[in-house]
Structure formats: C-alpha cells, structure tokens
Image (cartoon, grey):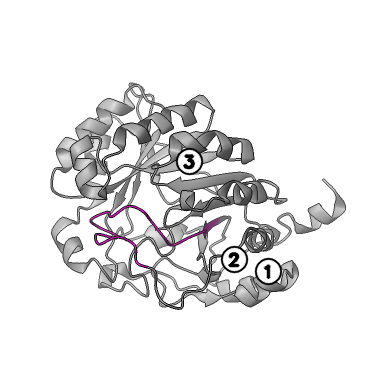
Amino acid sequence: MRNNEMHEAGQGVLEDGHGRRFYYLRLSVTDACNFRCDYCLPEGYRARAGEAAPLSVAEAATAMRAFARLGTRKVRLSGGEPSLRADLPDIIAAARNTPGIRRVAVTSNGYKLPKVIDEWRRSGLDQLNISIDSLDAAEFARITGHDCLPRIRTGIDRALELGVQTKVNAVLLSDGATERLQQFLDWLRDTPVTLRFIELMQTGDNRDYFASNHLRGDTIERQLIESGWQLLPRAIDAGPAREYAHPDYRGSIGLITPYSRDFCQSCNRLRVSAQGKLHLCLFADAGLDLREEIRRGDVAALAERIQTLVGGKAASHYLQQGQTGATRNLSVIGG
C-alpha cells in the first residue's frame, strides 16, 4: 500500500457521544424503485419536484474515501433499487478501490440480477442482499407488484456460483407468518444463504399498514431457539442482525428487531442518501447536507465535518414511541 493510501485508509476512529464506533456505511445511490411493495411504495415510486440529482460516481467515491479515512471498513450500496443505475458497476469498483474498504455489498430487489450479477462480481462485489418477502410466487407478486420470483432465484443461484456471500431479506408480516417461515426453512436446509427476518418498521407513509401487519421478531426467535438454532458471534462491521445456525441446515437465519429494548446500543452504521445527506439514524428528523464538501472533492474536510456531525448522534431512534422522523418510506435511504 502506498503512503498516501495508508494515510487515507482508516487512520481515524468514528465515534459518537455514546461511545459507539462506526465501521459500516450504507450509501444510497438512488431513491427510485421499480417495485410497489405493500409496506413501502404501494402506489409506486414518484419523484419529488426539485429533488437534487443523485451522487455521481466521482462524488460517491469522495464520500467513501472520507468514511474510510475515519475507519469505515464496509460499504453497502443501496436504494431505492441500485440496479436502476447503469453506472452501478463503476460505483462498486470505486468502493472496491477505496483504501481501507474491506467489504463491498449491494442491496437489491433482484429484478435484474441474472443479467448483472457477473459484472457486479467482476467490479468487486463481495456480498449481496436480495429482498424476498415470500417464496410463494403468487404471494411475492401480490406484495411487490412483480411476478418475477423464479428469475430472482436464478440470479441468487448464479451469485452463489460466483462465490458472492448472499443474504435474503424478508420483512416480517403477521398474516401468514407461520407458512412463510416453514417455506424458508425448507429452502435453507439445502441453500447456503443467510435469511434475515426484518421487523416491519413504521414510517411516515405506512402507519395504518404497520398497525395491521407488525409482528415482533422475538416471536420467531423463540421458535428458532426451541428448535435448536444457535446464536453466532457478531463481526465488528456486521449489520444489526442476530444470526443463528443449525447443524441440519446449510443456510442461516438472522433477525433484525428494531423495537427490541437494546437495539440501538450496538449501532455501528451510518447512512448517506443519494443526494449526499448524512443520516445519523434511519429515523432521524433530517439529513445533514454534505453535498458541498463532496462536490469540492476535499476528502480531509469532508471527513472532519462527518466526525463533527456524528458526535451529535442520538442515543436511540425512539421508534417505540412512534417517532419516525423524516423517513417517509424505506426507499429514501435504503432501509
């Protein structure tokens, strides 16, 4: 590693006022999405008038270098739906070529996956998260508005062939939860993916849907423990899931339970929106604009501003009190 790379690569430690350290950046590359999921964008994506253009490849690279300078080890490119950007492979490559970044991930709905996964892998992708809320094709189509589950599963099979660590995200919904769990367990017996059950979260746009469909993740967690699933150690740059394994299954199961009492104590991630706003929490009241520093390309100044802003991160998201902040829906900054 050259001297200038060593200077940029993780020389700082990004820490907030509560002693939490941040090694993981979720960088949204677009807030547009082509799915119409019931719990997120049931009417489909609608661009907002006057919305700034998303970060360019060069701007995204500047942001990632600044975070890496502060100790970030993992970058997840999210949306909206990242594959809607034709230049996503260039952003993946920029992440891969950022000194200090050890893991590059993408979260996608998988709609284009069979066509793009080989190029993503060549560009430097390590990890892939695909959203599948049901393995029943008809139910999947009803939830998302797209009848494409077989194509997505083909893309997952190809990702596994290429050696991409693959996770599947499933939002917990109360109606039909038992049947969906059994379908996923049957699949995981022979499929080496990590399934992550994510509690439905209340946002500004889904309050009624949340009230009718929310299911606590600890209900599923108790069933897993009673069936012999064992909790695995958590990596320093891992996401918020508590991950379980079972000797009879090739796949594993993680649970993300934002309504649990101590959820925020282990927070290790920060978010930057597609327009270059730092979100200290998924449910913060507002994003903090970094676009001016990003446009200047001054990595040192950007890192200094990020360090200052992170010091003001709140202790909790306060979802339990019904506070959803400025998050209208989860496509805005990637969930």
- Let me know if residue 39 is in the magenta part: yes
Left or right, 131 with reference to 275: left
Tag 2's secondary structure? Answer: loop
Disc with the residue nearer the chain's start (2 vs 1): 2
Q: What residue sits 82% from the left and 45% below the top?
A: 1
Look at the image and give the residue range highlighted in magenta: 25-46
Give the image quarter of residue 324: bottom left
- x, y (%) of residue 28? 50, 59
* Mark linked to residue 75: none
Residue assigned mark 1:
303
Tag 1's secondary structure? Answer: helix
Disc with the residue nearer the chain's start (3 vs 1): 3
Asked if residue 17 is positioned above or below residue 153 in the image, the reply reads below
Residue assigned mark 3:
128
For the residues marked 3 and 1, what is the alpha-carbon distance in whole angstroms?
27 Å
- x, y (%) of residue 115? 48, 36
Q: What residue sits 72% from the left and 68% below the top?
A: 297
- Let me know if residue 238 is in the magenta part: no
Q: Amino acid at mark 3?
A: Leu
Q: Quadrant of the C terminus?
A: bottom left
Residue assigned mark 2:
15
Asked if residue 235 is positioned above or below residue 57 in the image, the reply reads above
Please tell me which residue lies in front, 229 or 249.
249
For the residues marked 2 and 1, what is the alpha-carbon distance in whole angstroms?
13 Å
Q: Amino acid at mark 1?
A: Ala
